Amino acid sequence: MKKYALLMLLSALAGTSAALDPLFTSSVQPPKGCIDKNVTQDTLSLADLVQVGICTNPSLSAQYMGVKATEANLGAGRSQYLPSVTLTGSAGVDGKRTEGRGGYTQTEPYYGKAEAAWLLFDFGGRESRVHTLRAYADAAGYGYQAALHDLMLSVQTAYLRLLAAEETLVSANASLDSYKQSYNEAQKRYKLGMVSLSDRLQAKTRYEQALLAVVLAEDEVKQYSGQLAVLLNLPPDTQLHLEKPQFDKESTSIEKDDVQALMQDALRDRPELRAQESKESAAKSSVTAAKTNMLPTISATASADIADSSWKRHSYYGRENTAGLAVSMPLFTGFSNLYQVKSAAWTYKQEKANTQNLRLSIQNEVWSNYQNYKTAVRSYEISQTVLESAEENHRVAFRYYQVGKGDILTLLDAVAQLADARQNKISAFYSLLLSKANLYKSIGK
């Protein structure tokens, strides 16, 4: 019965060991609150899509496991501040028979010993090692945040590209209607003998080209729909119902329109930079830790042992206790410690250079994305004006052709200009949203 109770206790401890954190190292928590919507039936906003992506992404989950592993390493490092206790013991029968004498002897039936050691002083080596592990755990946590931001941008990019493709399909169908209207008018006037066969054929050609554009737009919608579904770890044929952004100033403007302030925000908030700074801090602490390996350590030690052979004729019952201080001093390690210090020092210098390089890279990234955003804003504003002019030009050209004052080439050119203007507005709007998303990503939002 006792055997089964012990097995159950060990199983319980093994099952809960992952949740135990007696040294309080756990700081990064997984995302919570996965949406309870029906992904294939309900209308999903961008926030919903991001939440689905975070909750189902295996790569992100694997990175989270890596974060927890570094936190566990930190716990192992902090355990150096606590004493270690070791128990050893033996029990059994060890006998032998001597030929010719009929004798039979045995040794002690059991023996036990307890040893304890506690590192008291090591010139800061233990502190440096723990600081190194803490910095690596921080770096892993910031790396996890950066992966979250990357996933959010990937989902947002796929979402906007799909919506742009759907708007392009709508525009292509609208252009097809305009070309069909022109073709019908040219065909009617040809039957009445008012225009030549050339008008009818040119209008028909443009109409069929517009029909091809619709087919290509439909394929593009299917491609982008599949890409978004796969990014959310769903089958590529999953039909998603998406909430569309508004064509308004709120969706296209940014909170802080100052590139210098945005660069400062990026240097403060970018998780990639925070992770690199943590690596630099870890490398710096590693130099101190490597130097302390060349210095002595002082530890408190204690032991107690017991042995029993009281059943024997000339027996004894023994117990021995000891306590004291132990000093350990490395005299010669084949220059291993020397080269470990050199390696740590060069690694620290390398991480400092990497940090400085990343700062410059982030500032340049923010600057470039900000300029792209401003250009996208201006392009979208111009595209709205161009579309208004193209719509008016098409109305005039079609009316002139109806009354016989215009030719087919002028009409078809007006239709083409209208189709281009409509498509340019769609591209400009979604390019603006993408440039805004990239700008926010570059400043750590």
Image (tube, grey):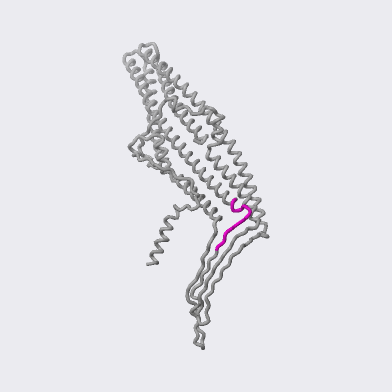
- 121 horizontally vs 28: left or right: right
Taking 402 as reference, is 228 above or below it?
below
Q: Residue 350: x percent and y percent?
A: 62, 44
Q: Nearer the viewer, residue 273 or 209?
A: 273
Magenta segment, which residues? 116-127
Q: Nearer the viewer, residue 183 or 373?
A: 373
Confirm whether residue 223 shows in the render. Answer: no
Residue 324, by quadrant, is: bottom right
Q: Which residue is found at the position 57% from the left and 64% from the top? A: 302
Q: Nearer the viewer, residue 314 or 128?
A: 314
Q: Nearer the viewer, residue 378 or 72?
A: 72
Q: Residue 318: x percent and y percent?
A: 54, 74
Outermost residue to the bottom: 100
Confirm whether residue 90 shows in the render. Answer: yes
Q: Is 257 one of the magenta-colored residues?
A: no
Q: Residue 398: x percent and y percent?
A: 37, 15
Q: Is 118 one of the magenta-colored residues?
A: yes
